[in-house]
Image: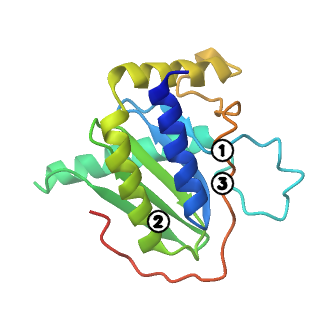
Amino acid sequence: MSREARNLHWLLANLVEEVPGLLSVAVVSSDGLLLLSSDPGRAEEAATADRPQGPRGSSADLATIVSGLGSLTLGAAKLMDGGGVKQTMVAMSEGSLFVMSISDGSLLGVHATPDCDMSVVAYHMALFVGRAGHVLTPELRSELRQSVEALSPDPEAGSGSGSVEETPEVPRPRGPQESGSRTVGSAQ
């Protein structure tokens, strides 16, 4: 694994460690392929049954959702002459979904608990985007895609249906924390 790939893994691990209430995090390429994920798969599910989980199909489902939402908001922005989309946030009764654009057209998606501090999530996502935008070159995207495809049980699955299970430096996100302010702050 290249130094740049290790740096991006470290940035994702740092995001997961610093922000309480994250369930799943994914970096998705501009063409919708999963590049990087915090989801180590469902092997731990039995051991952590009391812990909130991310989307049903893990990182592959989150990547699909992030890609679709990114495409939808980009189309809406074009129709409304709104310029580029910086961030999208969806508040649901049982969770929150954040999508933020990375400079190369890739997207950072975060699924969080309903009681997460939205301003903290947005702030740390903006930090990640600012740092990853300089690192995420075409060569690195290709390397990350290949690593996800190598882990995929079905290489024909398209959007990297395997999660980045062999990345020990990316821990499983923590569950909800006691403090749950729902204040939305400016991420950029």
Label 3 packing within 10 angstroms: few (<14), some (14-19), many (20+):
many
SS type, badge 1 = loop
Up/down of 53 relative to 115, above or below: above
The N terminus appears in which quarter of the rendering? top right
**Where is residue 14 shown, x and y percent of the image?**
54, 52
SS type, badge 2 = helix
In this rendering, which labeled residue sits more in front, label 2 or label 3? 2
Marks 3 & 1, CB-CB < 8 Å contact: yes
For marks 3 and 1, give the CA distance.
Answer: 8 Å
> Disc 1 or 2, which lies upstream in sequence?
1
| Residue in the picture at 42% in, 57% down | 125
Up/down of 58 relative to 82, above or below: above
Furthest toward the front, the residue is 3
Labelled disc at residue 54: 3
Labelled disc at residue 121: 2
Residue denoted by label 1: 39
Q: Please tell me in which quadrant of the rendered image residue 113 appears.
A: bottom right
> Disc 2 or 3, which lies upstream in sequence?
3
For marks 2 and 3, give the CA distance.
Answer: 16 Å
Name the foreground residue: 22 vs 10. Answer: 10
**Where is residue 3 shown, x and y percent of the image?**
48, 26
Tell me the amino acid under the disc marked 3.
Gly
| Residue in the picture at 37% in, 29% down | 31
